[in-house]
Image (cartoon, rainbow, N blue to C red):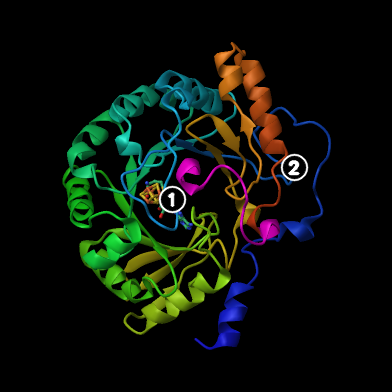
Amino acid sequence: MTKPEKEAAMSSPLPGAPLSDRGNKREGPAPQGPLEDRFGRSKHKLRISVTDRCNFRCHYCMPEDPQWLPREEILSFEELLRLCRLFVTELGLRRIRITGGEPLLRKNIEHFVASLQPLRAQGLERISMTSNGTLLARHAAALKAAGLDDINVSIDALDAELFEHMTHGALEPVLDGILAARDAELPVKLNAVVIRDQNEQEIVPLAEWAYQQNVSLRFIEFMPLDGNGGWNPQRVVPEAEIIERLRRRFAIEALPRTREPATYYLLDGRYRLGVISTISKPFCSSCDRVRITATGDIYPCLFSPVSMALREPLREGASDGELEQIIREAIWRKGKGFVESAGYVQRAAGMHTLGG
Ligand code: SAM
Ligand code: SF4
């Protein structure tokens, strides 16, 4: 791809109406009814981090020397469950994704998954998890039995040395985990962050492998949320360039855009592959997510510099109605998203505390 093509790809328009052109920002306090923000985006998905701890040190996510939060600051499963119940029964959210840090490091995580099951009768449709996969071989069957619907596993390279360089962890257990999940009939999707001068050469091998295994794969553009300050726009491999590389190996057809964050393509007329292009094609105009950190801070957006705390009111005896009002206000005040952040987000919570 030439330099002007790369620049054009980096500034390509939003899918759907750009928020800046909608001009429909509403003022006043948060309304009752479905959970939504001032720009009319209603919320359906909750991503809840159950730990900030991780057994990897992916340089694009973690600081080199992470300071783990004291355990008493992390929400208990009872506290997490109360929030999940509120989000589903009172605020109408339909999907919960459990993330981290590495969620499989949290002891008895299967019990937490099982404790969410009664919420299905209240409208919860899906319970998912995002994991680095290292401990998955050990947990896959129990997670399936507890009622987990699917799991996303992060895998940025098939070259073991490069994988280790990027994550400070070993590839083999991750591959074992992916196969164990398949054996346990737990649906798996793969996520791969692509970073210039690191793993662009892995794009085709990863796609070939996922295609052969018939496992869904999504490439993710590198976002300015890493722990070490190594992000810059030149290190982003935009969607257009990822597709250009794949075109050398596969026949590619773009599929119509949906409300999902990924844009999908059909490879060789049969394999569906996605690209999450937060940087080159932000999808902020259709964002329907809410994020809670392991310490109970609610972030209306990955790129939001501010959060609202739920842990103190939870522990000080707030009623469901009071908690609901805090959540509604936090979401109502959500900004436009990445489209207005233009670069690094300076704040205490890194990607490993927010959960991606
Ligand atoms: N430890 C689990 C894992 O790695 O899947 C869950 C937490 S991790 C923060 C969630 C997702 O965020 C992973 O797929 C990871 O690749 C992605 N991620 C982390 N830092 C990122 C960054 N700077 N840009 C894009 N994606 C990132
Ligand atoms: Fe850990 Fe996931 Fe962050 Fe890697 S991306 S350091 S596995 S939390």
Q: 203 left or right of 184?
A: right
In the image, the segment drawn in magenta is 339-356
Q: Amino acid at mark 1?
A: Met
| Magenta-span inclusion, residue 41 | no
Residue bearing mark 1: 62
Residue 338 appears in view: yes
Asked where in the image residue 35 lies, by quadrant, the reply is top right
Q: Is residue 160 above or below residue 38?
A: below
| Magenta-span inclusion, residue 343 | yes
Horizontal and vertical percent position of residue 188? 29, 50
Q: Is label 1's Cβ within 8 Å of ligand 2?
A: yes
| Distance of label 2 from label 1 (alpha carbons) | 32 Å
Q: Residue at x 52, y 28 (%)?
A: 88
Asked where in the image residue 347 lies, by quadrant, the reply is top right
Q: Secondary structure at mark 1?
A: loop
Residue bearing mark 2: 38
Q: Is residue 75 above or below residue 93?
A: above
Horizontal and vertical percent position of residue 198? 38, 71
Viewer-nearest of discs 2 and 1: 1
Q: Nearer the viewer, residue 146 or 56?
A: 56
Q: Amino acid at mark 2?
A: Arg
Q: Is label 2's Cβ within 8 Å of ligand 1?
A: no
